[in-house]
Amino acid sequence: MADTDPPAVPRPPTEGAGPVTTREAQRTVHPHLVSPRLRWQIFAVTWIAYAGFYFVRQAFSVAKLGILDDPLLAHTLSERVLGVIDAIYLAAYAVGQFVWGAWSDRFGPRRVVITGMIGAIGAACLMGASSALLVFGGAMVIQGLAQSAGWAPLCKNMGAFFPVAERGRVLGIWSTNYAFGGLAAPPFLGWLAYSVFDSWQAAFFCGAASLAVVLLLFVLFQRDAPAPGSKGEKEPGAEPARRGGLALYRSTLRDPMVLTLGAAYFLLKPARYAILLWGPVLVSDRLPHVDKVGATVIPVAFGAAGVLAPIAVGWVSDRLFQSRRVPAAVLSLALLTVVLGLFMPLTATDSVGVMVALLAVIGLAVYAADSMISCVAAVDFGTEDGAGTAAGLVNGCGSVGAILGGLLPGFLSGSSLFLLFSVAALLAGLVMLPHWNRRPRTAAAQ
C-alpha cells in the first residue's frame, strides 16, 4: 500500500461554496499540495486544544478528595451524590457528542470548538465559586455539553489534512492528547489545589485559567480545512457549506460498521472513565496509607501508558495490519479483559508498586483500543461527507457507556466493579471480532 493517497483530480470550486468536508478534502486535495507547515500547525493546535479540555474536565476528579474530607459538605456531597453528579455530566456529554459532530460537518470545527471551550471555562468557574448542590448539577450539565464539543470536531479537523494511508500513525500520535490531558491535569491541579492554595475550589479556577490560554492559541492558529488547489491558507472565518443534519445522520448510519464501533465503544468506555473520574478515590480506598497528593499522583501511571498506547497501536494498524483497525483494537481489548479481572486480587497486596504497574497496563490496553475505535476507525468508516457525524455518533455511544463509569464506583464494591468492567471489555472484543479483516473503503481502493 502506498504511503500517501493517489493524486485526485480536483473538482472545480463552486462559486460561493464554503470549505470542503473531511472526505472532500481527501478526494480533491493531494497531500503534497497542502503546505506541510500548515498541516503540522493544525496537528499541534488541535492536539493542544483537546489536551486543554482535560484541565477543566479533571478538576472535579481532583476536587473530590477535598470535598469528601470537608465536614461541612459531608451530608450534601457524599460519594453517592458525587457519582450522580458525574452521571449527569456524562449524560450531557453523550447528548453533546451526538450533536456537535454533525454541527462540525455543517458549520466547521472552529466555531464548535471555540463555543465548547468558552462553555467549559464558565462552568468550571461556577463550580469553584459555589458548593451548592443545584449549582454543581447545573454547572456539570454545561460542562458536559461543552466538553463534548471537542473530540469529534477536532477529529474531523485532522482528517481534512492527512490522507488515510498515514492516518493510523498520525492520528495515533495525535490521540495522545487525551491521554496526556488525563496524565498531566490531575497532579498539576492537585498540587495547586492542596499544596499551593490548600483549597479544593482552586482546582476549578486553575483548570479554567489553563483552558483560557489554550483558547487563545486555538483562535490564533486553527484552520478548518485546506482550500482545494492551494497551499491551504484558508481564512479561519470562512463560511462552511450547509448540509441538513438529518441527512448526515441517515447517510452515516447506512454503514453497519459505524454501529459496530458505537456498540464496542459503549462497552469499553465505563472502565476508562471510572479510573479517569474516580482514580484518586480508587487508589485511596485500596491504599489507605497514601496521602491525598499521592492518591492524585499514582494514577499518572494510567495516563503515562495511555500516551504511548495510541502511538504504538496506530503504527501497528497501518504497518502490520495494512490499515485494518479492528485487529489492533481486538487484541487490546483481550489484554484489558485479563488485567481488569486481576485488579482486585493483585491490589490486595497493599503495594504501591503493584498498583502503579496495574494502572499502567490498564492504561496501555484501554487507550490503545479507545484511540482505534473513537478516532481512527470512526473517521475511516464515516460516510462520504460525514466524518464528523460518524465520530460524533461513535463517541456518543461511548459516552452513554461512560455514564456508568462515573456512576457505578459510587455504588458498587471494587470486586463487583472490576469484574463488570472485565466482562464488558470481553463483549466489546467479541462484537468487533467478525470485522477482523474489514478495511476502510478508501484504503481498499489503493
Image (spheres, grey):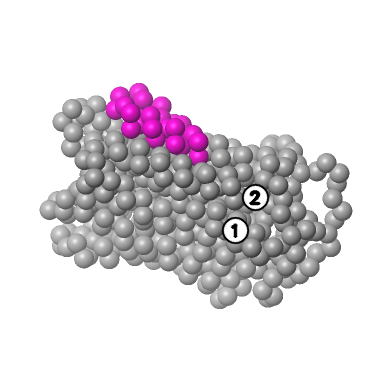
Amino acid carrying mark 2 in the image: Arg
Q: Residues within 10 Å of mark 1 (few under 14, many from 20)?
A: some
Cβ atoms at labels 2 and 1 below 8 Å apart: yes
Which residue is label 1 attached to? 41
Amino acid carrying mark 1 in the image: Gln
Q: Position of residue 226 (x, y in %)?
A: 71, 55
Q: Residues within 10 Å of mark 2 (few under 14, many from 20)?
A: many
Give the residues in magenta.
Answer: 117-144
Can you see residue 221? yes
Q: Along the polypeptide, which appears first: circle 2 or circle 1? A: 1
Foreground residue among 443 and 432: 443
Quadrant containing the N terminus in the rendered view: bottom right
Per the image, is 140 magenta? yes
Which residue is label 2 attached to? 223
Q: Secondary structure at mark 2?
A: loop
Residue under the point 29% across and 35% down:
201
Residue under the point 68% across and 37% down:
245
Q: Is residue 240 left or right of residue 184?
A: right
Q: Position of residue 391 (x, y in %)?
A: 59, 49
Above or below 80: residue 435 = below
